[in-house]
Image: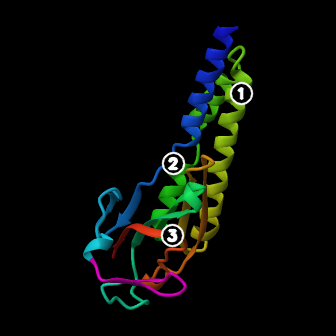
Amino acid sequence: MRKKIVIFLLSLTLAFSFLSNFNTVAYASNDENTNVVDISTPVVELENVDATETADSEIQILGLPDLTPLKGAYVKSNQYAAGGRVNIDWEYLYMTPQDARKYASKVEASLAEAAAWIAASWIPQIGAITGTLGGLSMLERAGLATEIRKYTDNNQHVRIVMYYDKFYGIRGRSAELWDGRMGGVKNHAGTIIKYETWS
């Protein structure tokens, strides 16, 4: 009985590690080629900038007008209240249509990964759980890639919204339309932790 419980717990740990593996690597294009931008090292940090927030949380940095075109941006904030019961990390990734297409391709599950999850579903005792969790992960990723392509097919800029609720342990992602300009880079909730743009 103990062996079954240990196997079950190990399979859940493995499955949840796949479900929570969200890639926040962004692509920034320049005129010659495309470079990967490591968003863990901010281009502009909030402490070093004269930043003000308006009533609707629109961020104004370095006196740039709202119509300034950008090739991308990243905003990370934390929403905290009620002694930790509300503790949500928000990340906003702003991308050009070309960069969003690359991101959608990276997010979507490959055929080899789908085959691996199908094979894992045949493992005795834990296969049903592992296969189900893998299938749910692939559905979430396919849904996000479809949302992104809804905008990139019309050559529109995209904002990816990612959240992690630390109290409940819930993660999620969605894609929204972005106008490609500085005025569209906003913090919708909480205190800003990181803010960076590239043009």
Up-down: is 180 above or below 95?
A: below
| Up/down of 137 relative to 152, above or below | above
Marks 1 and 2, how far apart in space? 21 Å
How far is mark 3 from mark 2, CA to CA? 21 Å
Q: Position of residue 1 (x, y in %)?
A: 70, 8
Indicate whether residue 125 is drawn in magenta. no
Q: How is the image coloured?
A: rainbow
Q: How would you rate the neighbour count of disc 1 (Cα within 10 Å): few for under 14, some for 14-19, many for 20 or more?
A: some
Closer mark to the observer between disc 1 and disc 3: 3
Residue 30, picture quadrant: bottom left
Q: Which residue is mark 1?
A: 129
Residue lying farthest to the left in this orientation: 48
Q: Secondary structure at mark 3?
A: loop
**Residue 53 belongs to the span the image colors magenta:** yes
Give, as a three-letter code, the residue at label 3: Gly
Residue 190 circle label:
3
